[in-house]
Image: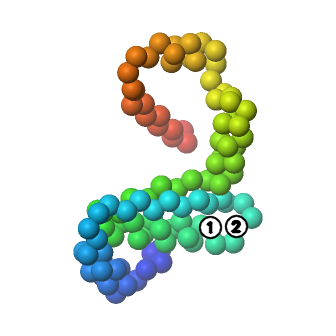
Amino acid sequence: MALLNDSIRAEVQTRFKELENPVKIINFTQEIECQYCAETRRLMEEIAGLSDKLSLDVYDFVNVLESIMMVSKKESGLSAETKKKLATLEKPLHLQVFVTPT
């Protein structure tokens, strides 16, 4: 169920026609011990969907904390073999990882 009704969506889309440059929305969230995180994420998803100039990145706060800890310890969690292979790269590499729940 949408949080914004049709009238509000139309009004926001009209305002967003004035956007000149792309805008990235970053939403830090967590699913535990957060009263309004789910609703805030849904709202940000709805808003970002109202203009091609908007994008949304959602980060789970707990995973961000784990990442900070890994960076601090200079430990990526990669195997020695993977690190050795990566060290042989001579130019930038664009890598995408897709994860599904199945």
Coloring scheme used: rainbow
Q: Which residue does the numbered mark 1 point to in the structure image?
A: 37
Q: Amino acid at mark 2?
A: Cys
Residue drawn where x is 51% and y is 40% of the image: 100
Q: Is residue 92 above or below residue 68?
A: above
Q: Do tag 2 and tag 1 residues touch (Cβ < 8 Å)? A: yes
Residue 87 vs residue 41, the one in the foreground: 87
- The x, y position of residue 12, in whole percent, is 34, 80
Horizontal side of residue 61 vs 84, given as left or right: right
Q: Amino acid at mark 1?
A: Cys
Splitting the image into 4 quarters, where does residue 45 fall? bottom left
Q: Which residue does the numbered mark 2 point to in the structure image?
A: 34
Residue drawn where x is 29% and y is 63% of the image: 21
Q: Is residue 80 above or below residue 32?
A: above
Residue drawn where x is 31% and y is 67% of the image: 51
Splitting the image into 4 quarters, where does residue 81 fall? top right
Residue drawn where x is 62% and y is 67% of the image: 37
Q: Residues within 10 Å of mark 1 (few under 14, many from 20)?
A: some
The label shown at residue 76 is: none
- The x, y position of residue 16, in whole percent, is 30, 75
Q: Is residue 55 visible?
A: yes
Q: Residues within 10 Å of mark 2 (few under 14, many from 20)?
A: few
Q: Is residue 68 above or below residue 90?
A: below
In the rendered image, which quarter contains the C terminus? top right
Q: Secondary structure at mark 2?
A: loop
How far apart in space, not on screen, are marks 2 and 1 (Cα)? Answer: 6 Å
Residue 23 vs residue 49, the one in the foreground: 23
- The x, y position of residue 74, in whole percent, is 68, 30
